Amino acid sequence: MKCIKLKQAGIDVCVTIKVKPIFLKKSSEDLKEELDRLETRRVLEHLGARQEAAVAERIVREFEDRKEVQ
């Protein structure tokens, strides 16, 4: 989770990205395949978490831009 303080608004903006892979093929329950699926899930969750800061910053920037327009 990435949080950014918006002091002028008195709030924190927090972003969490949860990646949920949906495998189209049913599991064969083979151990190797299950390990591959777990690794795929882990990598995707890690990649999603790496994007949290960028998303939070963009949301804050757009919020601040709206406040300036009003």
Image (cartoon, helix red, strand yellow):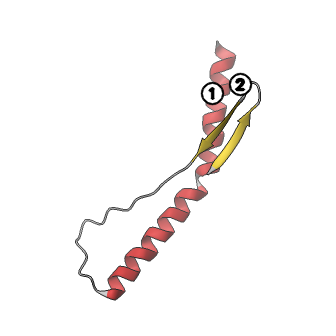
- x, y percentage for residue 47? 54, 62
Q: Left or right? Give the position of 46 relative to 28.
A: right
- The single residue placed furthest to the top in the displayed view is 70
- x, y percentage for residue 36? 39, 80
Nearer to me, 10 or 44: 10
Depicted 18 relative to depicted 68: above or below = below
Residue topped by disc 1: 63
Describe the element under mark 2 as helix, strand or loop.
Answer: loop
The numbered dot on residue 39 is none
Graded by Cα atoms within 10 Å as few (under 14), some (14 to 19) or many (20 or more), the crowding at tag 1 reads few
Depicted 63 relative to depicted 47: above or below = above
> Residue type at mark 1?
Phe
Residue occupying the point 76% across, 24% down: 8
Nearer to me, 6 or 68: 6
- x, y percentage for residue 25? 23, 70
Describe the element under mark 1 as helix, strand or loop.
Answer: helix
Residue 9 figure quarter: top right
Graded by Cα atoms within 10 Å as few (under 14), some (14 to 19) or many (20 or more), the crowding at tag 2 reads few
- The single residue placed furthest to the bottom in the displayed view is 31
- x, y percentage for residue 22? 32, 62
Depicted 69 relative to depicted 50: above or below = above
The mark that comes first in sequence, 2 or 1, is 2
Residue occupying the point 40% across, 82% down: 35
Residue 19 figure quarter: bottom left
What separation in Å lies between label 2 and label 1 (alpha carbons)? 10 Å
Q: Left or right? Give the position of 25 relative to 65.
A: left
Q: Are marks 2 and 1 in contact (CB under 8 Å)?
A: yes
Residue occupying the point 60% across, 35% down: 59
Which quadrant of the figure contains the C terminus?
top right
Residue topped by disc 2: 9
Q: Left or right? Give the position of 14 relative to 36.
A: right
> Residue type at mark 2?
Ala
